[in-house]
Amino acid sequence: MLSFVVPAYNEELELPATLASIHASISHDVTAPSPQSSPSGRGGREALGEGTCDYEIIVVDDASTDHTAGIARDASAQVVSINRRQIAAARNAGARVARGDILFFVDADTRINRQHVIGVIEALRAGYAGGSAQIAADGTIPRWGRVFLKIFCAFYFANRLGAGAFLFTTRENFDKVGGFDERLFIGEEVYFSLALRKLGRFKILREPVVTSGRKLRMYSARQVFARFAGIILRGKRGAMSRERLEFWYDGRRETRSTS
């Protein structure tokens, strides 16, 4: 069983493409890439199903005021409703009801493909404790945004840290590290990655997931750099309060999808 946990707040525009990408990634072509045992101890073919995967999608609707929940149900996803406005809490809420041996955390504005599913299974069978993937922004973003993203990704992934848009691990390892730290309003993926690295190797898949570039389109270079500089200067303590985190929590959304 593969469990895809999708935290969402007012994502009626991006969510359909995200859910469609998950369904499409689990096709008859996704079969066991090796005969080795899965993390659950079952053989590859049995763990994945003969010719198809046993999977579930859990959308955690965190206080949405739009049609996020209805869109999720229409796409055959289970909906878990919370009222926290905190992505760490949303991911943990989804994981609590997940039935899978392997947990995928996919942001509601992020598209994955079959290679990510295969790569995750191969990495976990090879003994990795968990991992993430390179990221690419969708649509057209300004030149400064492309440069910023390239530099950020080079530094970030060189340090073997997982992007919040896409994270994976086993149920066993998730429970061992205690899930995501709900004291944090941002940066929880960094500390989740560091916790997993204490258990074993951390894999960064080369195949990038495609995530929304909306923040690079909706905010100026000055606004983006100021927000990131503030986070660096305040450190972990600055991530433990929603104060001055409007860049992540103001709820601004684009009016049309680029997918």
Image (cartoon, grey):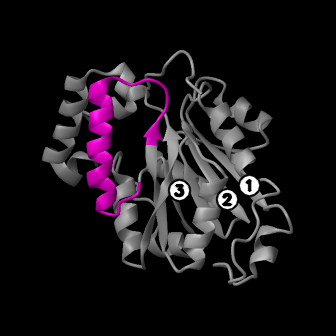
Per the image, label 3 sits on a secondary structure element best described as helix
Spatial separation of the CA atoms under disc 1 and disc 2: 5 Å
- Asked if residue 173 is among those painted magenta in the image, a careful observer would answer no
Label 1 vs 2, first from the N-terminus: 2
Residue drawn at the location 53% of the way across and 56% of the way down: 92
The one of 21 and 89 positioned closer to us in this rendering: 21
Height in image: 120 above or below 68?
A: below
Spatial separation of the CA atoms under disc 3 and disc 1: 16 Å
Q: Residue 187: percent from the left, percent from the top?
A: 33, 50
Q: Residue 46: percent from the left, percent from the top?
A: 81, 76
Residue drawn at the location 31% of the way across and 22% of the way down: 219
Q: Residue 105: percent from the left, percent from the top?
A: 55, 53
- Asked if residue 139 is among those painted magenta in the image, a careful observer would answer yes
Residue placed under numbered mark 2 in the picture: 3
Which image quarter: residue 146?
Answer: top left
At label 3, the amino acid type is Asn
Kindly tell me whether residue 33 is visible in this rendering: yes
At label 1, the amino acid type is Glu
Residue placed under numbered mark 1 in the picture: 56
Please, which residue is most extreme toward the left here? 233
Q: Which stretch is magenta?
A: 136-162
At label 2, the amino acid type is Ser
Residue placed under numbered mark 3 in the picture: 92
Per the image, label 2 sits on a secondary structure element best described as strand
Per the image, label 1 sits on a secondary structure element best described as strand
Please, which residue is most extreme toward the top here? 255
